[in-house]
Image (cartoon, helix red, strand yellow):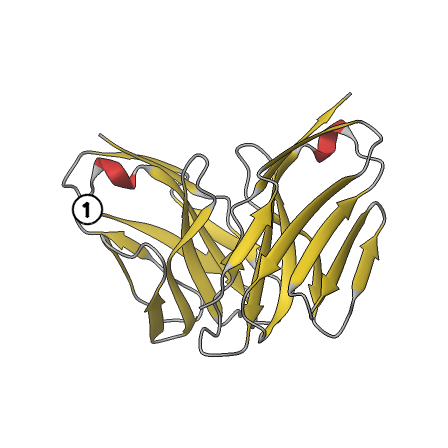
Amino acid sequence: GENVEQHPSTLSVQEGDSAVIKCTYSDSASNYFPWYKQELGKRPQLIIDIRSNVGEKKDQRIAVTLNKTAKHFSLHITETQPEDSAVYFCAASNRGSTLGRLYFGRGTQLTVWP
Amino acid sequence: NAGVTQTPKFQVLKTGQSMTLQCAQDMNHEYMSWYRQDPGMGLRLIHYSVGAGITDQGEVPNGYNVSRSTTEDFPLRLLSAAPSQTSVYFCASRYNSNQPQHFGDGTRLSIL
């Protein structure tokens, strides 16, 4: 099955700096890559996603890039703010034998210092 | 449109008791999943379903049963609760494998 690795596990940045979280996946059939943000005590919420026919996608201060050849994708947050502090999860899924299953990375705890 | 609704929000059980965590969605999603989340362990898949009558095991299925008799509901049953099952449980659903997954608010379960 699919294996999603996420790095780093913790990340501390100063307010205003950029943050980058990287994920790799193992199954070349994976074609959908969402990112989730989970604040303390809350449910994971989708912040951005990308499909395999696109190399990059932006939404205000958040962007995701995908390199299908190298099988990795990254989350970029610019001009970080204290409210960006949370755990971020990457994930991957495909239309193969594990149809319906979303494979998650282990999460990155992002702390933004004012 | 309520999204994914989980009940109860909190529950305390004694070892050996059984209970069912309820999950319902009103978005006509075919795919539904149950995860448990322990401190520092991320989201671990317990069971998932790709439609009514179809379920499969995830990473940590032992001690849990599921069934999917309708598109809307996907209950998770603990047959004989153990302290190791103390966790936060999230139910999630999505339309298909190429669409976002939506999570419920979670059930915080403590087993004494």
| Depicted B39 relative to depicted B35: above or below | above
- Chain of the residue where label 1 is placed in the rendered structure: B
Seen in the image, is B83 located left or right of residue A71?
left
Q: Amino acid at mark 1?
A: Ser
**Residue most extreme to the bottom:** A96
Residue appearing at x 44%, y 41% in the figure = B41
Relative image position of residue B105 (x, y in whole percent): 50, 44
Residue B1 in sight = no
Frontmost residue, B63 versus A16: A16
Where in the figure is residue A40, as x and y percent of width and height?
56, 32
Tell which residue pokes out farthest to the left in this image: B16
Please name whichever residue, A76 or B89, is drawn nearer the observer in this view of the structure. A76
Q: Which residue is drawn at the image coordinates 34% and 58% (left, top)?
A: B75
- Dot 1 crowding, Cα within 10 Å, few <14, some 14–19, many 20+: few
Residue under label 1: B18
Taking the image as shown, residue B65 lies to the left or right of residue B68, namely: left
- The answer to which image quadrant residue A28 occupies is bottom right
Note whether A36 is above or below A113 in the view shown: below
**Label 1 SS:** loop
Q: Where is residue A67 drawn, in percent x and y?
A: 72, 65
Residue under the point 39% across and 75% down: B52
Farthest top residue? A114
Q: Quadrant of the C terminus of chain A?
A: top right
Q: How many numbered discs, if any?
A: 1
Quarter holding the N terminus of chain A? bottom left
Q: Is there any visible trace of residue A6 in the rendered image? A: yes
**Where does the image place residue B66, in percent across and percent down from the top left?**
30, 62
